[in-house]
Image (tube, rainbow, N blue to C red):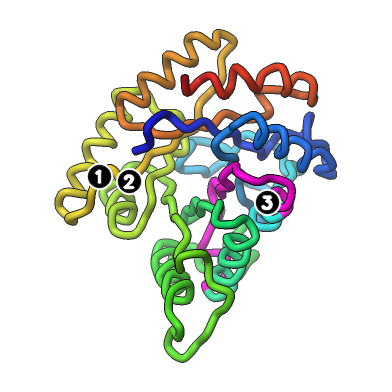
Amino acid sequence: MTDRPLVGVFLTHANDLLGPDLARLGEVARRLDDAGVDYLTVADHIVLGSDLSAHDALGGALGYPLTEPYPEPLVTLAAIAAVTTRIRLMTGVLVAPLRPPALLAKSVATLALLSAGRLELGVGSGWHDAEFAALGVPIAEKVARLDAGLATCRALWRDESCTGLHCYPQPPGGTVPVWFAGKPTRATLRRVVDTGAGWLPIRQLDPEAAATARADLDRACDEAGRDPATVGIRCPLAPIDDWGALRDTVARLWESGVDGVHLPLRRLATSLSELDAVLPRLTGLAA
């Protein structure tokens, strides 16, 4: 756990502010960085099929049109890394099984170095059948590929040779923090405890659900001999007009074991002037 709640911003789906060509992306990132926002996160889809109805984690359809832009997360974060200095950069979430493990290891290690160690890799196993089919990846193998692919990444990041293969550059310290997304199943929480930095819920948690998940994580840490303080929870937060109530929600989630919350940029501002006005309130949520 951190010594205060971390406050982040979810950049994807903010087309009114960023524009379809992402021309304002760097300026928005610089303003978040200068204001003291702790982290930013971007989503991932390589392609979308016509049927978006089967998003299990959301319990329904993906609520965006097929023309919704999904800039590739690692490329996007590399551009942001070039114009920022302190804000942490997070994928939220990268569909890791869709990428060859060695290529993923190389891309992530490169970005970790370019950002001076500010990268945090949020990963999930994916859900969209058409996307897996288009990439030639059997969706039935998604969980096994997630686990095996990340194991390969960790080996390539730290070992001089991984089964005779060499992959340089390696990330700072030979590792990158990996956060696992999904429902708080025993399997997901076990992944978090075994090799992860923390858990990423897909939806906002209420304080009671957060406390339950925190207790389950702490119990799993005890069983594995890991310090529970080294495992975090970061969840999306739905903004409301009452900033006082929002600050109270953050405080209650913090007390329940959530150490980071991120709000959608598209609900915060539609112009740079609106963003400037809201940033002090945003960073004040952690006060």
Label 2 neighbour load within 10 Å: few <14, some 14-19, many 20+: many
Residue 215 locus on image (x, y percent): 22, 36
Residue 177 locus on image (x, y percent): 45, 55
Residues rendered magenta in the picture? 79-101
* Left/right of residue 8 with respect to residue 248 in the rendered view: right
Residue matched to label 1: 228
Q: Secondary structure at mark 2?
A: loop
Residue 190 locus on image (x, y percent): 27, 54
* Left/right of residue 219 with respect to residue 187 in the rendered view: left
The residue type indicated by label 2 comes to Val
Residue matched to label 3: 81
Q: CA distance from mark 2 to mark 3?
A: 25 Å
Residue 228 locus on image (x, y percent): 25, 44
Q: Secondary structure at mark 3?
A: helix
- Is residue 102 within the magenta segment? no
Q: Which quadrant would residue 283 be assigned to in this image?
A: top right
Residue at x-position 65% and y-position 60% = 114
Disc number lying in front (2 or 3): 3
The residue type indicated by label 3 comes to Ala
